[in-house]
Image (cartoon, grey):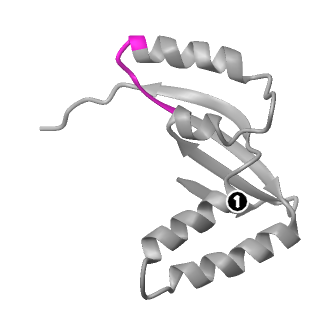
Amino acid sequence: MSVIVRTAKNEIKLFCKGADSVIMERLVAKDPNVPLTMEHLESFAKDGLRTLCLACRILTDEEYNEWSIEYRQASIAINNRHELVAEVAEKIEKELILLGATGIEDKLQD
C-alpha cells in the first residue's frame, strides 16, 4: 500500500508499507539499513509478531506527472481495472529507501 504526498517544501514523496519480502526487493541497491532491519524482522517474527516494512522515495515533478496520467487511465478502465492499477503502482514503487520495520501483535477480535 502506498501514498504520494506533496510536502511543505514542495517535494513529492512516495511512502510504501508492505510485507518485507515485497519492500526489500524494491529498495535501492545496497541500502545500508537492510542487514540490521532483517535481524529485527527475524526477532519480531520469532516473537509471533506481524511484520511490515516502511520505505519512501522522492519523485521528480516529471516522473510524478507521467505516472499520474497512467494511473488515471488505469483507474477508469472498464476491464481489468484492478490489474492495471497494480501494474501502474509497481512502476513507481521502485528504488525505495528503507525507513524501518514494525512488529505488531495481531490479537484476534471477538
Amino acid type shown at disc 1: Ile
Give the residue displayed 80% in from the left and 22% down from the top: 32
Which residues fall within the magenta stretch?
A: 46-52
53 displayed left or right of 69 = left
| Residue 106 image point, x, y percent | 31, 30
| Residue 1 image point, x, y percent | 52, 53
On whether residue 48 falls in the magenta region, the answer is yes
Residue 101 found in image quarter: top right
Residue furthest to the left in view is 110
Give the residue displayed 61% in from the left and 81% down from the top: 72
In the image, is residue 41 above or below residue 62? above
Residue placed most toward the observer, 49 or 21? 21
Give the residue displayed 60% in from the left and 84% down from the top: 73
89 displayed left or right of 76 = right
On whether residue 49 falls in the magenta region, the answer is yes
Residue 9 found in image quarter: bottom right
Name the residue carrying label 1: 92
24 displayed left or right of 29 = left
Mark 1: few, some, or many residues within 10 Å (few <14, many ≥20)? some
* Number of numbered discs: 1
| Residue 67 image point, x, y percent | 72, 72
